[in-house]
């Protein structure tokens, strides 16, 4: 990679690593979101523990820190060249999940992945977001919507004939999100079994 590409890739990780939920919760309510609820600094926990305004702001910030690195990478890439965009998108997601600013313990990657793929795969993201909304509304759990949305993304990418490398990144993001949601899956299973 050229120097500019390496710099953009490094900045992509740092952009993803900005702990939006932690900073917003501290600013608005003076609380450490890692000590509340699930302890996760992502938008869902901020929404539940700090409020709708803080949660919505976190969601937007987390999505934008995935969206903009891909746009910058597109600007400096040759026409039709996807590699730098893929690398920057992946690094933004990794930065969010394993942020250097919070001891490498970050969010689950849902909103940042949404921002990355809104830039990389805007058409497949439309049904993916609809699946997320429907899953959340029908179940009453943001985690269910997130899991279903993560599963939908690589499928919609494949159905829309997206380039192989982009579909592969969508599948990788899906796997990461599912792994990060294993504790949520266990809690949901316990709730189901208690009924």
Image (cartoon, rainbow, N blue to C red):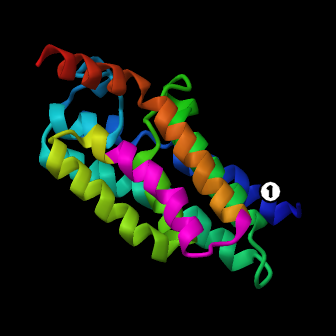
**Residue at left offset 32%, top offset 59%:** 131
- Residue tagged 1: 6
Residue 117, position as x, y percentages in the image: 52, 63
Q: Position of residue 151 (x, y in %)?
A: 46, 49
Q: Give me the residue at 70% from left, 50% from top.
A: 10
Q: Is residue 39 left or right of residue 174?
A: left
What range of the chain is rendered magenta? 146-164
Q: Look at the image and tell me in which quarter the N terminus lies.
A: bottom right
Q: Does residue 112 show up?
A: no
Specify the farthest residue to the right: 2
> Image quadrant of residue 83?
bottom right
Q: Is residue 50 left or right of residue 70?
A: left
Residue 177 visible: yes
| Percent of width and height locating residue 27 | 24, 39
Pick out the residue farthest to the bottom.
Answer: 79
Residue nearer the viewer, 123 or 105: 123
Answer above or below: position of 147 versus 158.
Answer: above
Residue 20 drawn at (x, y percent):
38, 44
Quadrant of the image occupied by residue 187: top left
Residues 148 and 3: in front is 148
Secondary structure mostly seen in the magenta stretch: helix
Q: In front here: 63 or 186? A: 186
Q: Is residue 18 left or right of residue 140?
A: right
């Amino acid at each position: 990679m050229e120097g500019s590409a390496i710099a953009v890739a490094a900045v992509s990780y740092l952009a993803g690593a900005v702990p939006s939920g932690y900073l917003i919760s501290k600013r608005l309510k003076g609380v450490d979101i890692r000590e509340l609820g699930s302890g996760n600094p992502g938008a869902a926990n901020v929404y539940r523990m700090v409020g709708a305004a803080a949660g919505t702001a976190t969601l937007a910030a987390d999505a934008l820190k995935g969206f903009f690195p891909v746009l910058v990478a597109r600007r400096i890439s040759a026409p039709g060249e996807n590699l730098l965009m893929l690398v920057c998108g992946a690094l933004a997601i990794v930065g969010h999940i394993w942020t250097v600013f919070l001891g490498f313990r970050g969010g689950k990657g849902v909103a940042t992945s949404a921002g990355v793929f809104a830039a990389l795969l805007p058409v497949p993201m439309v049904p993916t977001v609809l699946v997320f909304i429907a899953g959340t509304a029908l179940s009453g759990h943001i985690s269910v919507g997130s899991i279903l949305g993560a599963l939908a993304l690589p499928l919609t990418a494949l159905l829309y004939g997206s380039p192989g490398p982009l579909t592969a990144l969508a599948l990788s993001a899906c796997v990461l999100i599912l792994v990060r949601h294993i504790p949520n899956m266990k809690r949901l299973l316990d709730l189901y079994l208690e009924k």
